């Protein structure tokens, strides 16, 4: 919270930082090494980018098991086509994961799977957060599962991945205005779905 | 014909979806849910803008609700990839 000239303002500060220019060059250097035969170096790219991609996949599928499968298939696909990377590796691999999630949503008949049904731990940072099965967590999962995929994707990128609208626009190749509208619509739909219990 | 695995191409396919079949239900905006009116101050705060605290307090229960949602999404923002996954990916790559 910041106080400016007798007036109190509140700012949320949770933006994820996109990679800087030197990081992009460092990624390209790793890609060059992998393409030259040093397969082990690919592990560095996995370590560098898997967390935000995993959060995206969990947010889109609601299932840690399916998210892990999507991530595994996406990184294997990325490895097999590494020579086709042009520009930012993180943006390229994000699109592979995002498409994997969309394919999963197209093919899956169920609309919701709670974390409790999965074998895999969800990946929360602490055991306390992992075990926190508060009502809101389950209800939020269910409400997210009821959103159209484009709204769910926008909400997850903004709130779960903590991306700026500018970065979202770059990754999804659309405008900031369109994404703001999707996020706002997602919030209003979630509020409607949850208001009976929480408001 | 070879599969086109360029993720950008896949993205373009999403922009022009085929007609859905019974096996493949339409996925984009097929059911736009009813929506509540979320106050602008809440949207602005959630978007990371400077918001006067009194405007948030005026939103009452809605502010409290979104504060709780933010707390939960904050936990998800700190989620880590399950530790065995990177090893599994590398093993699969080496088998290739």
Image (spheres, coloured by chain):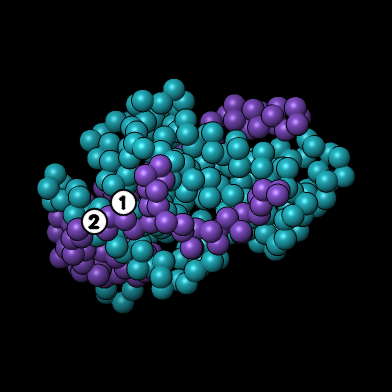
Chain colours: A cyan, B purple
Residue position for label 2: B33
Residue drawn at 54 percent across, 33 percent down: A69
- Give above or below for A56 relative to A172: above
**What is the secondary structure assignment of the residue under circle 2?**
loop
Can residue A187 be seen at all in this image of the molecule? no
Quadrant of the image occupied by residue B55 = bottom left
Q: Nearer the viewer, residue A102 or A130?
A: A102
- Mark number, residue B48: none
Q: Nearer the viewer, residue A45 or A151?
A: A151
Position of residue A50 measured from the top left corner of the image (x, y, whole percent): 59, 42
Q: Horizontal and vertical percent for residue A197?
A: 14, 44
- Residue A1, compared with residue A66, is above or below; it is below
Q: What subunit carries mark 2?
A: B
Q: Residue at the bottom extreme?
A: A5
Residue A21: x and y in percent read 70, 63
Q: Answer whether labels 2 and 1 touch (C-beta < 8 Å).
A: yes
* Dot 1 alpha-carbon crowd within 10 angstroms: few under 14, some 14 to 19, many 20 or more: many
Chain of residue at mark 1: A
Label number found at residue A147: 1
Q: A20 left or right of A35?
A: left
Describe residue A151's horizontal placement relative to residue B38 as left or right.
right
């Amino acid at each position: 919270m910041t106080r400016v000239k007798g007036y109190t303002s509140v700012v949320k500060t949770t933006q994820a930082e996109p990679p800087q220019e030197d990081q992009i060059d460092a990624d390209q250097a790793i890609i060059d090494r992998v393409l030259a035969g040093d397969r082990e170096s690919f592990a560095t790219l996995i370590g560098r980018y898997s967390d935000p991609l995993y959060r995206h996949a969990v947010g889109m599928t609601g299932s840690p098991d399916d998210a892990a499968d999507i991530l595994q298939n996406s990184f294997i696909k990325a490895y097999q086509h590494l020579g086709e990377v042009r520009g930012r590796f993180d943006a390229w691999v994000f699109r592979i994961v995002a498409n994997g999630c969309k394919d999963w949503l197209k093919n899956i008949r169920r609309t919701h799977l709670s974390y409790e049904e999965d074998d895999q731990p969800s990946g929360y940072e602490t055991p306390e957060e992992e075990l926190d099965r508060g009502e809101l967590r389950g209800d939020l999962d269910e409400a997210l599962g009821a959103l159209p995929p484009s709204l769910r994707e926008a909400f997850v990128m903004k709130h779960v991945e903590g991306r700026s609208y500018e970065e979202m626009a770059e990754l999804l190749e659309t405008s900031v205005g369109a994404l703001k509208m999707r996020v706002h619509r997602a919030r209003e739909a979630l509020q409607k779905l949850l208001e009976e219990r929480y408001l | 014909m070879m599969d086109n695995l360029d993720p950008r191409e896949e993205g373009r396919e999403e922009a022009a979806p085929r007609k859905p079949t019974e096996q493949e239900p339409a996925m984009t905006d097929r059911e736009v849910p009813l929506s509540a009116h979320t106050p602008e101050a809440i949207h602005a705060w959630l978007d990371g803008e400077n918001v006067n605290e009194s405007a948030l307090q005026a939103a009452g229960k809605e502010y409290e609700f979104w504060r709780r949602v933010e707390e939960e999404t904050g936990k998800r923002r700190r989620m880590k990839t399950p530790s065995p996954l990177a090893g599994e990916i590398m093993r699969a790559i080496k088998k290739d």
